[in-house]
Amino acid sequence: MIRLEHVSKTYRTSTRPALDDVTLQIEEGEFVFLVGSSGSGKSTFLRLLLREEQPTHGTVRVAGKELGKLSNWKVPALRRSIGCVFQDFRLLPNKTVFQNVAFALEVIGKPQHVVDTVVPEVLELVGLEGKALRMPHELSGGEQQRVAVARAFVNRPALLIADEPTGNLDPGTSVGIMKLLDRINRTGTTVIMATHDAAIVDSMRRRVVELDDGRVVRDQARGVYGSGS
Amino acid sequence: MRAQFVFSEIGIGLRRNLTMTIAVIVTVAISLALFGSGLLIRKQVETMKSFWYDKVEVSLYLCGEGSAEPTCSGSPISDPERQELLADLEATPEVEQVFYESQAMAFEVFQEQFKDSPDLVENVTAEALPESFRVKLRDPTQFGAVAVAFQNRPGVAEVQDQKALLEGFFNFLNKLQLLALIIAGVQVLAALLLISNTIRVAAFSRRRETGIMRLVGASNLYIQLPFLLEGVLAGLVGAGLAAGALVAVQAVLIEGQLRPNLPSVAFIGWDDVLTTLPWLFLTGMVLAGLSSFVTLRRHLRV
């Protein structure tokens, strides 16, 4: 469902390419870890999928649609079919947990009665049933990330992107988040996760794509973090 | 799109930026009030110009019942005198065209010009108004020659050059109107810049929310609409204030002071003011909307 063909991306202010001739294919329902040191191109890869950036060369296809040919007003529709989770949670600080998750439904125009049904369901899914009325600053890091996952998942997207979701969390909490992402993946959602977290990658043994200086150096089916031996 | 959501976002935005919003409203109000004043001055000039002002140069008022001028000898102009006068006028080489205005016609014109002073109109009858010959000259500067020729003629009560009478005053009013429009123009520029700045600051301070809205897949219109409506709303409130100011001036100055104290002058009335008000609102909304829209395109990443 995701296909990159000879994709290169060089930012305007730099000489070195962020991504260099990347060709990659990810099928529906896969769980892919994107690993590599800082600056290897992981975030750029994810931004291309969201069409936050466009490649300098090559084509990016998501769910059969070529992103380069997508007109600007169709981009919001693309982003509705992709859920995202970030290292810094990106919750709205002045809204409750419920309102934060409901936001994803409200901005696409879902009526109130739909919101009132769906949001509690998804809060239960992530294990935050009793905390619907809390404010983000009253929650722990792990709980905030769960809210973010709930918001990403509430529209039942086909693809879920996570950019270092466990970056600000302790190992124990990280495992909890990973279990959540795993459950989401089992419902059929494709999950792509960029991460530094070696322990997580090693324990889950999924497909690992390693980037180094913008190039794909490893693409392993049941891989580990380091170039395994 | 959920209306309630959009309106609550607008409310939050306006309150957050209250001082700047007030600045926008005041600037818009001043510029629109001046713009409206310019329009009303133009209407006043039109009202003060009688029906004949632009059409003829010389007005010969004929003797009527009870005219006291020496050339009248206490009696109205007779039919033969009138015919002879008309013939002589038409024969005069400087004269291009002669119009006759009967007392009845004069009364109609009077009613139209002073329609906003019903008290005055009630107290005047057609008989009180003189009949007149209105003369259009080939060369307007020849007024002197024509006046001298017909001034002392029996049956002619008075020869008037209305342009000389009122031209100075109209020049003054026109200059006033120009001044009002120039200041209005400067204020409009200030208002546009202020609106642009307000929107820019608002967009910047809400970049976290708009960023998340973009990631979550909200349409561009949905993200931009609260900002646009904030701008238009401020423009509307400014227009409302300007409208209120013009209405107050009409009520206090024109109806309250000028019309009662200067009964022989035709002033603009409520219908002139009320037909100007919609233009204020339209201009206010369009200016604010355009400025907001252009600013958003440049500063709100979508």
Image (spheres, rainbow, N blue to C red):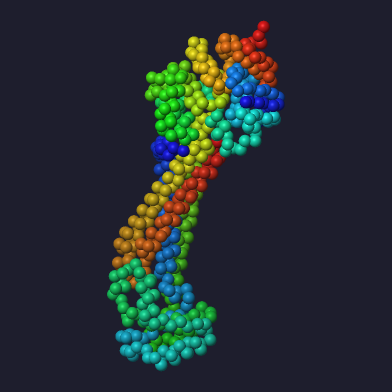
**Residue B142 seen in the current view:** no
Q: Quadrant of residue B42?
A: bottom left
Residue at the farthest top position? A229
Q: Residue at x 68, y 15 (%)?
A: A218
The answer to whether residue B262 is above or below residue B209 is below
Residue A113 percent location from the top left of the image: 41, 32
Q: Quadrant of residue A48?
A: top right
Q: Quadrant of residue B272?
A: bottom left
Q: Quadrant of the N terminus of chain A?
A: top right
The answer to whether residue A211 is above or below residue B258 is above
Tell me: A192 left or right of B173: right
Q: Residue at x 53, y 31 (%)?
A: A80
Residue B131 percent location from the top left of the image: 38, 83
The answer to whether residue B86 is above or below residue B259 is below
**Residue A150 seen in the current view:** yes
Residue B15 percent location from the top left of the image: 39, 37
Please count the marks in the image. Answer: 0
Depth order, front residue of A44/B240: A44
Q: Residue at x 52, y 36 (%)?
A: B219
Depth order, front residue of A209/A164: A209
Q: Residue at x 37, y 91 (%)?
A: B78
Residue B38 percent location from the top left of the image: 44, 59
